[in-house]
Amino acid sequence: METEGIKLFVLAAEKLNISAAGRELGMPPSVASARLAKLEKALGADLLRRSTRKVALSSEGEEFLPFAREILAQENAALAALGFGREHVSGTLRFTAPSTFAQQYIVPLVPEFLEMYPGINLDLRLSDMELDLIQGSFDLALRDSVLPDSNLKARKLADDQRIFCASPEYLEKWGTPRHPDDLHSHQLIAFKSQTSVALVGPKGEKTQVEQRSSQNRLIIDDGLSYKIATMKGAGIAIHAMWSVHKELKTGALIRLLPEFRVESEPALWLVYPKSNVLTAKVRVFIDFLLERIGERPPWLT
């Protein structure tokens, strides 16, 4: 069972188009169809259902697909171990990340990465709602915390901070809180399912801020909208430093309660399934992000 046919199957399954998958591998449509048929004969199963109008995965194809990806991953890892350079790194890398962070820091770097590694295609799924790595067949994900999942591995991309901030207009209207207890008389904005935040004061004292209180009139699940609402004076919010460091410098947002820090300071992590070999395409993308972002995070300079 040769890997070229497996590579063709994986591409065809992703594109649901055999001819397009063949073209990406430099095969005419007739050759691609014959190569796929040869693989199906070797396996004794129809992997794709073809009709004149569309292509779909068969049940056998759905079962075989994760194993096919693993076979290709093992091949790439073996080639990397033998010292093959970046010109030999190839494949489609499925990566998911929070859309707000990706728009600011990752997407602007994509053209440079694709030029460095012409054999790699990026499939980016960007959402501020966390997507499941295993069910989504992702090679890599960006998270702002290490998930308590024994099936995942993680590597730190960069440190971060969480801070309270509000717009000058809001503070002019409602006043500036000097202690976490003062937040009871303010409007609060919560991000997604965030309910309470543990804070540590200048003398080591601990306190809790309940965002889901009577003062909380706004809950948002999109990072950019969350920041815009804060800038427009909707209330006080806790933001990641990477998201608001520019607005703090320009004065569009004001940092509040600087003497109090979030007890468990977050970090940004690159997370990948433990069962996967760290393939060449994933390894070079991790190294690229660490070099371009992790070595000198712009929000901490």
Image: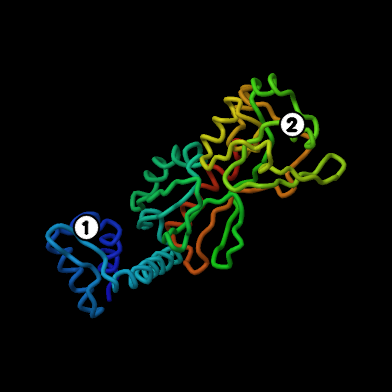
Q: Secondary structure at mark 1?
A: loop
According to the picture, the residue beneath numbered tag 1 turns out to be: 17
From this view, report whether residue 170 is shown above or below residue 180. above
Give the x, y percent position of residue 131.
47, 54
Cα distance in 3D space between marks 2 and 1: 59 Å
Q: In this picture, is 296 found above or below 49?
A: above
Asked if the residue under mark 1 is in contact with the one under mark 2, i.e. CB atoms within 8 Å, the reply is: no
Give the image location of residue 2, x and y in percent. Answer: 27, 73
Q: Quadrant of the N terminus?
A: bottom left
- Residue lying furthest front: 214
Tell me the quarter of the image containing the C terminus. top right
Report the label total: 2
Circle 1 residues within 10 Å: few <14, some 14–19, many ≥20: some
120, 56: nearer the viewer = 56
Q: Specify the amino acid type for callout 2.
A: Ser
Label 2 packing within 10 angstroms: few (<14), some (14-19), many (20+): few
Up the image or down, 223 lies above or below 120; here it is above
Q: Nearer the viewer, residue 139 or 145?
A: 145
* Residue at left offset 50%, top offset 54%: 141
Which amino acid, by three-letter code, is at mark 1? Asn
User: What residue is drawn where x is 58% and y is 56%?
Assistant: 155
- Residue linked to disc 2: 185
Residue 253, percent across and down? 63, 26
**Image quadrant where residue 29 sits:** bottom left
Q: Which mark is residue 38?
A: none
Q: Position of residue 244 (x, y in %)?
A: 60, 32
Q: Secondary structure at mark 2?
A: helix
Residue 245 or 26: which is nearer the viewer? 245
Look at discs 2 and 1 and give the one toward the viewer: 2
